[in-house]
Image: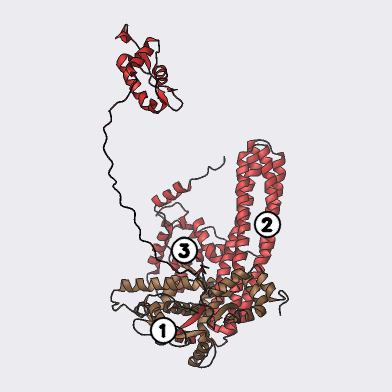
Amino acid sequence: MSGRFASLEDVVQDRTFPAVDVALRRGHHIDRDAADWYAFLSDAQDHLEPFYRRYGCELVKQSEGYFYLLPTGDQLPRRHLTGGEMLVGQTLALQYLDPATLQSGGIVTREQLLTRLASLIGARALAKIFEPRRRRFDNERIVHEIVRARIAEGIRRLASLGFIELVDDERIRLRSPLLRFAEPVRGLSDPAAAMERLVARGEIVFTATTGEATSVRSLDADASAAEDVEDDLNGLPHEEEP
Amino acid sequence: MSAPLRDPHRLLAGLHKAGVSLELSSLDVCFLAALHLRADQDGLASFDEELVFDIFDQICDLVEPGAENSRKRATHAIQRLREQRMLARVDASGVVSAGEYALTSLAIAIVKSFLDDEQLTRESLALLTGAVISSLGQIRASASRTEGETAWRTNVVSPLRVTVGDLIGGIERRQRGLDGQQEDVQRQIGELLQDDWFGAVDQCQALLDATTGTLQELNEVLMRDSSLIQSLLQEIQQSALAKEAKEAEEAVQRVVEQVDRMTAWGNSRQKAWSGYYLYVHRFLRDVVRLDPDRALSQRLLDQIRAWPSRPFAQIAAADDRIRLLRPVSARGERPPVGRRRVNRDSEVTTVSATDDEVDLEALVRQELRDGARDLATVTRRVLAHITPADRYRTIGRVAAVVAKLARPRSLHERPWITVDDAVEIEDWTIEIGRGEHET
């Protein structure tokens, strides 16, 4: 047990607790860059883990130095990241691992991200993933507009979850929680098996692209599949009710 | 005489109008550098034409081996550099004899920026700040006993501008050199990891520590010496202020700003470097050491490529709704919106157009007869006979009657006179002809 907090009451009475608690419940990832919050969580971890478990959540600390709350039960609402957010997050994680990014101190531009993503998936394929209901992708200008808009949306959401920090309109600071996107391939085991383990732990969920909609395939027996499809059709982030 | 402050807009417009531009190829820069190095080596102030051609030949062999017509190309290169004020012909013989050339200050500055490795070290900074402090000490002593404009200029302004200004300029130049060195280190760290991943960790660590150490030492010197420099400058400024030496005051102020800039550089670089240092440390620890074979990037790349065919999504907590603690209530029947039907048409009645019982004209006539000679007096007296509710509209009528019975005269600027508790009017003077109010 940490010497700073003798009991859960001490933790809750700390002036940092309300802000950190709200941030965690909103899905925010807290890393070493948020020095005060990170120090608070590190010191209070032993008390907070059982505390959040009572809400059906796991307070997870990764070895790269970041915390997040993972809902495993039904008491706390949760969402799964949209396709755009997943693609942007994985590509930014790839850039985080690239030593070339070191020269800029972990800062990349939106243009670099766009170029990288387009080179990995292709602009048209990206537009199809982002806009599954659209049939025609002949107009290059429209394809680029779709891709740009959805990437911008993904960046904004990832920033609100603490994966990245927006330095200004153009530049993005990469943060260590991005490595969560690389979690399925962290070990040397078969990625499919690793992914199944993550699904079992409630870290990720498989989604099926069915032309016009994406729906939850596993993990939540109680989640309403109809609601998932509806949300995805509307292009909204999926949210699961407790 | 002090140099007047130049207007930057005018200067820039002048440069633009003159079409100033520089265009140097790699060959040109190498040629200039070779001339500079040769002058340095042999102590030459200028070069005869044959030597210039020789040096160009050597550069051609090095940069573009096998190129033909080197003599012709040398002539063109010399011409090009002369047009851009990089080379100057110093023999004054025109075209009648072989030329004698020298590098201009512009060419020397360009070559030096490529060749000289002017970086800030603890020793060079301590030496330079020491020289600044010593010069300022002498200037302070001169300032305390100097009298007269010319003496101030000679003993204070010029040393401040030339000696101290140049010394601090030297520090700033070296600061820029160190900025360049830091950029090199950052690039080098990236390249080392790119080439040798796990094997480069120790080298990266050493590079980081070396630069961090240098910055810390420099900042210590800057913090220590800049406060001493500032206090010396303050004393000189006070002497200038006491003896009303305006030019010296301005010169001191300029140096103060230079010193501020120099100190701010130290703080900002240390802050920026500390962010970079932390980031690289975490990268080495969390990424490189945990993935010594650098397999993760490739596996992640494969994961991204396969994602569209087998999509998955991360789960995150999402308790981001505002809880409204509203009491539950069964909603009752809402009554329809409506109002009672009534006949809203009102009966029309006949009223007289005027119901004045006061003979306004008679009252005005009486006041004029009693000697009132301005509109305000007449109005005030007439209003005394009128009920308060009718006074406002009566005022205009009084004016009309006065205009009818007499000749109003008004000044260009008519004064506002109070005639009632709530009303002021613009006044007229009234002129009455003989027997006029009798009618």
Residue at the spot x=54%, y=89% of the render?
A187
List the residue tagged with mark 1.
A225
The one nearer the camera, B155 or A225, is A225
Residue at the spot x=32%, y=78% of the render?
A133
List the residue tagged with mark 2.
B129
Residue A15 seen in render: yes
Label 2 SS: helix
Disc 2 and disc 3 in contact, CB within 8 angstroms: no
Image height of A79 relative to B368, above or below: below
Measure how far apart labels 3 and 1 are at the Cα level. 83 Å
Q: Amino acid at mark 2?
A: Thr
Q: Colour of chain B?
A: red
Disc 3 and disc 1 in contact, CB within 8 angstroms: no
Residue B282 position by quadrant: bottom right
Q: Position of residue A183 (x, y in %)?
A: 52, 85
Mark 3 or 1, which is nearer the eye?
1
Image height of B159 relative to A164, above or below: above
- For disc 1, the chain is A
Query: Pointer 2: residues within 10 angstroms few (<14), some, or many (20+)?
Result: many
Q: Amino acid at mark 1?
A: Ala
List the residue tagged with mark 3.
B52
